[in-house]
Amino acid sequence: MLKNDRRQGVQDLLDRFFRMQNNLLKETERLEKMLWEENKLRQQGYCFIAGLDEAGRGPLAGPVMAAAVILKPGTIIKHLNDSKQLTAKRREFLFEKIVVEAQAYGLGSASPEEIDRTNIHEASLLAMNRALEKMPQRPDYLLVDGFTLRSNPCKQKAIIHGDEISLSIAAASVLAKVARDDLMLKLHKTYPQYGFDRNKGYGTLEHRQAIAKYGLCPEHRKTFRLKENS
Amino acid sequence: MTTSRQLVGKTGEKAARDYLEKQGYQIVETNYRCMLGELDIIAREAITTVFIEVRTKTGLSFGSPEESITVDKAKRLKRLAAKYLQAYGLSETPSRIDLIAVQLDRNDLSVLGLKQIKGILSG
C-alpha cells in the first residue's frame, strides 16, 4: 500500500492526489447543486431551459448586454460561477467552454440611445428578449436573474441572485459580461479618452475626470445622472 | 437544430475554406470521416495533398494555436492522412498536414483573424 511508504516524496504525492480528488468531488457537488432548478424542471417535462442574465446595468457608457443559454442536461463546466466571482481570465476561458458545450446560446443588447429613450430596466428586458430571439433553439422555460420578462409569453421563473444559484444563469452572466467587455474594448479604439478598455464604461474616477475634460461621446447614456458632476 | 458547438465550428471551417480557395488551393473534401476519426479539410496545392486541421477560438487575443494539438490528436491526424492517401493510391505523392487557426468575434462570430501553419507534423 502506497500509504505505508515512508518516503516524503511519496507522501506528498499522495496528499496532492487526495486533495485534488477531494476538490474535484466538491466542485462536482457544487455544480450539481447549481443544476437543481434545471433538473427539477426537466422532471416536470421541460426540455429547453434557458438561463438569462445581463451585464452593464451600472455603467455610464456603452450598451447593456444580455445572454440566453440552454445547457445540455448534466453539464459539467468546472469553475463556472456567477461572473462577478471570477477573474477576467477565467471568464474568458469559460466563455469559450460555454459557447462550445451549450445546447444553444444567444446574445442581445440595447444601445445607449435605447437606454436613454426608456430606462435601464426596460433596456435590459429588450436586450434579454433580443438574446432569446438570436438563440437558434426556442426555449420552453426561462430562468431569469432577478426579474421576470413580462412581455415574453414563455413560462418563466425569476430567481434573485440567480447567477449564484442556477448554472444556466451563471453561464449567461459569463457570456454577457465577456461579450460586453469585448465590445467596450472595441469602443475604446473609437473613443480612447475615457479608458473604456479599463473601466468598461463604469464611472471610475478616471472616467469621470475624462468626461469633465472632454465631455460626452455618443456611447454615453445621457440620462444617467451624476455624469455632469465630477 | 444547430448546437453552439456546431455553430462555432462551422463558422471557423467556412472561414478556413474561403481562405484556402483565395490562396489557390483546390478543396477536395471536407469532414472526411472514417473509423479512425475525421479530417476537417482535404485540399490540393498544385500536386501536394494538404490535410488541414481547423481550430476555432473566440476572443480578441490569439494565443498559440499550436498548443491546442495534443500528442494523441497529432498521431491520429497522421494516421488518418496516411489512410486517406492509401485509399486513393496517393501514398507516393507529396502531402502535408497544416493547421488553420481561426479567431471569431465573441459578439457576432465574425472572423477577426486567421493563421495558417504549414507542415505542423514533420516526419
Image (spheres, coloured by chain):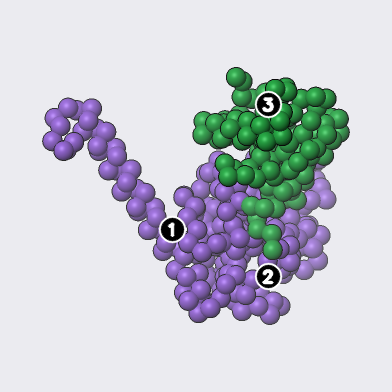
Chain colours: A purple, B green
Circle 2 SS class: loop
Marks 1 and 3, how far apart at CA: 49 Å
Q: Which residue is mark 2?
A: A138
Viewer-nearest of labels 2 and 1? 2
Q: Amino acid at mark 3?
A: Ser
Q: Which residue is mark 1?
A: A31
Which quadrant of the rendered structure holds the N terminus of chain A?
top left
Residue nearest the viewer, comparing B43 with B63: B43
Residue nearest the viewer, comparing B28 with A159: B28
Q: In this rendering, would A117 be left or right of A128?
A: right
Q: Chain of mark 2?
A: A
Viewer-nearest of labels 2 and 3? 3
Residue at x-position 60% and y-position 19%: B123
Q: Position of residue B119 (x, y in %)?
A: 67, 23
Judge whether B92 appears above or below A213 on screen: above
Residue B101 sits in which quadrant?
top right
Residue A107 visible? The answer is yes
Q: Chain of mark 3?
A: B
Q: Amino acid at mark 1?
A: Leu
